[in-house]
Amino acid sequence: DIQLTQSPASLSASVGDRVTITCRASQNIRNYVNWYQQKPGKAPQFLMYAASRLHSGVPSRFSGSGSGTDFTLTISSLQPEDFATYFCQQSYNTPWTFGQGTKVEIK
Amino acid sequence: QEQLVQSGAEVKKPGASVKVSCKASGYTFTSNDIIWVRQATGQGLEWMGWMSPGSGDSGHARKFQGRLTMTRNTAISTAYMELNSLTSDDTAVYYCARGVTNFNWLDPWGQGTQVTVSA
């Protein structure tokens, strides 16, 4: 199975900060990475596919990059509604594994 | 809009089975795979398997071999996930989600179904 390792596991940041989350795959997965946001007690919500393509309606402060084994999700200016947990997911091979999540907390 | 609505919370004893339903609306049910994902409290997301509502074909993670059955009723646009031989390790929120295109992103997700396994 393909392993996805996210870092950091958690971070504290302030409104307006730039935040970067990393997702590393155990093998080459081209650009088959999707990103999700999850708030407490809620189902995950889809943010981005193919490593860098924003889902319709997702604010442009979110961006993604990467190919192969290393991927990043960046929030250019953190907003109050962005405090949540973020997961990467690979869809290159089944089982479609997820990273363990990165919790973005208020500093 | 596209929506998945799941059945309600379940409490089961060890060794029992649970069946969770996932009703689709707002899109053609047979056009996209349904994916099942679970999340234990405070933990990450675990992909369980997929099912094609159009063909009935399915696949699942190795750890669920022999315990997981995914079915559907196309007449009512509903997918089902049944997990057998439950243990306390199966206590989790179970989600269904629609798989979309070649990149198989998951959108939308159902609201989740809490399954608690307790003696």
Image (cartoon, grey):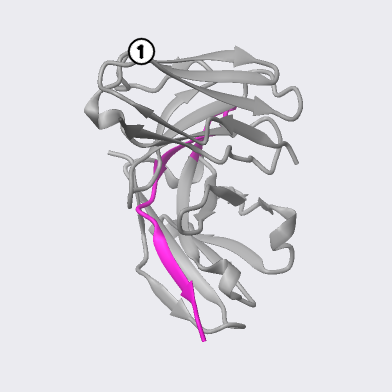
Number of numbered callouts drawn: 1
Residue B72's place in the image compared with B66, above or below, is above
Q: Position of residue B91 (x, y in %)?
A: 51, 68
Indicate the chain on which mark 1 is placed.
A
Nearest the eye: A18 or B69: A18
Q: Is residue B107 left or right of residue B83?
A: left
- Residue B8, compared with residue A4, is above or below; it is below
Q: Position of residue B76 (x, y in %)?
A: 39, 59
Q: Position of residue B30 (x, y in %)?
A: 49, 45
Residue drawn 53% across and 30% down?
Answer: A8
Q: Is residue B87 above or below residue A69?
A: below
Give the farthest residue toward the bottom: B119
Q: Residue at x 46, y 59 (%)?
A: B41
Which residues are drawn in magenta? B99-119
The amino acid type found where label 1 is placed reads Ser
| Residue B106 highlighted magenta (yes or no) | yes
Quarter of the image where the C terminus of chain A is located: top left
Q: Which residue is mark 1?
A: A76
Residue at x-position 45% and y-position 24%: A48
